[in-house]
Amino acid sequence: QVQLQESGPGLVKPSGTLSLTCTVSGDSIGTYRWSWIRQSPGKGLEWIGYIYYIGSTNYNPSLKNRVTMSLDRSTNQFSLKLTSVSAADTAVYYCARSPDNGWTYFFDYWGQGKQVTVSS
Amino acid sequence: DIQVTQSPATLSASVGDRVTVTCRASQIISDWLAWYQQKPGKAPKLLIYKASTLQSGVPSRFSGSGSGTEFTLTISGLQPEDFGTYYCQHYNSYPWNFGQGTKVEIK
């Protein structure tokens, strides 16, 4: 059974950098697409971007200038960095998997979510 | 960007009822649409992809239909465990966007 688990600080200061890691267990990180999605009361569910197992990325244009994703196949983890955060970035952050067999950009496995609050 | 709009925002129904949620896309998205169920404090769960394909393990009372810009999620015979919020998500072109959600309450 595939499982995803987010980890990282739950509190980030304004103008700082939000850093989260997703650890994948039960399957190899290879041959899938791995996304970050966030959810806040004000904006609902928002796709942040994905990283492919070979390392290529695609980011939501609304966040593109502040987002970096990376992947480590040796540890079966992938990561998110979001810079210059403000209160508007306060949300529950999810990592999620998309299958890699054609145009399959939906999310079949999700982590449990990590609450991140931006506050001084 | 393609936006997806759900209706209604909230619905209340009785056990055994047939329930329908609608998702409308701002542009034609073929059948590149997924549906999710989310319960409080939990991550969304995939129910349907490619508009009408049932995800493995999802009860057959859930079904999806539509193509182009109009889509529906139907629950045939609402069960107590079906309460929660339902979201559609398009994946026709970047960025992928979600609907604002439909909260299903059990009467």
Image (cartoon, rainbow, N blue to C red):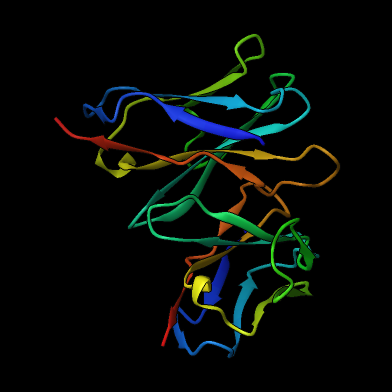
Q: In the visual, does A98 lie left or right of A36? A: right
* Residue occupying the far top of the picture: A74
x and y percent of residue B39 in the render? 45, 61
Front residue of this view, candidates B79 and A6: B79
Q: In the visual, does A63 lie left or right of A35? A: left
Q: Which residue is at a point 67% across and 36% down the rendered structure image?
A: A1
* Residue occupying the far left of the picture: A120
x and y percent of residue A67 in the render? 48, 28
Q: Determine which quarter of the picture holds residue B12.
A: bottom left
Where B27 falls versus A109 (above or below)? below
Q: Which residue is at a point 54% across and 74% down the rendered structure image?
A: B6
Q: Which residue is at a point 18% across and 34% down the rendered structure image?
A: A119
Can residue A36 be seen here?
A: yes
Q: Total of numbered circles in the picture?
A: 0
Where B9 falls versus B14 (above or below)? above
Front residue of this view, candidates B45 and B32: B45
